[in-house]
Image: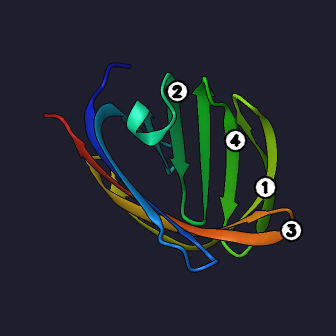
Amino acid sequence: MENNAMIKIVTVQQPVDGTPGDKIELETVGKFSVRDGKFYIKYDETELTGFKNTSTMVKISSDNVLLSRFGDVESRMEFELGQKKLCNYNTPYGSIPVATELFELTNNLDKSGGNAKFSYNLDFNNEKFAVNTLDISVKTKG
């Protein structure tokens, strides 16, 4: 499938220790599709996001999200409303065990694009490390 959408991702990571958070915005072309009531968004990361040579696929349904990365950085993070999910975050320096807990999911996507936003707690070493929010906008071509 060729690139068929303009995708904008705004990621905010707010550490729980009160230090200033990070905000990263990426606007890129990518792929968008709908299958069995689930929305698939695929795009290539850049050096700006810290994931150079990596592709990201986000699958969104009514109550869960799957975020997978392939390339220099590989990871598979699952998010389900109200559930803590354990996963490994693979980096060039090794694998880091983390836990995610999705507490907000807004899905206003349809077959022509739209917006989805989700927020989750990120735990490291059994302690809440940060609150992350991803806001994804999709505009299909044509």
Left or right, 32 with respect to 28, comes to right
Residue 90 higher or lower than 15, as above or below: above
For the residues marked 3 and 1, what is the alpha-carbon distance in whole angstroms?
A: 8 Å
How crowded pointer 3 is (Cα within 10 Å; few <14, some 14-19, many 20+) is rated as few
The residue depicted at 54 percent of the width and 64 percent of the height is: 62
Disc sitting over residue 134 in the figure: none
Sequence order check, earlier mark of 4 and 2: 2
Q: Is residue 46 visible?
A: no
| Quadrant assignment for the C terminus | top left
Q: Which residue is mark 3?
A: 126
The residue depicted at 32 percent of the width and 19 percent of the height is: 2
Q: Which residue is mark 1?
A: 98
Q: Nearer the viewer, mark 1 or mark 4?
A: 1
| Residue 94 placement: quadrant | top right
For the residues marked 4 and 3, what is the alpha-carbon distance in whole angstroms?
A: 19 Å
Q: Nearer the viewer, mark 4 or mark 3?
A: 3
Q: Which residue is mark 2?
A: 54
Q: Is residue 86 visible?
A: yes
Tag 2, which secondary structure? strand
Residue 58 higher or lower than 74, as above or below: below
Task: Name the kind of residue labelled 2 in the image.
Answer: Thr
Q: Which residue is mark 4?
A: 76
For the residues marked 1 and 4, what is the alpha-carbon distance in whole angstroms?
A: 11 Å
For the residues marked 2 and 1, what is the alpha-carbon distance in whole angstroms?
A: 20 Å
| Quadrant assignment for the N terminus | top left
For the residues marked 2 and 3, what is the alpha-carbon distance in whole angstroms?
A: 28 Å
Left or right, 130 with respect to 23, comes to right
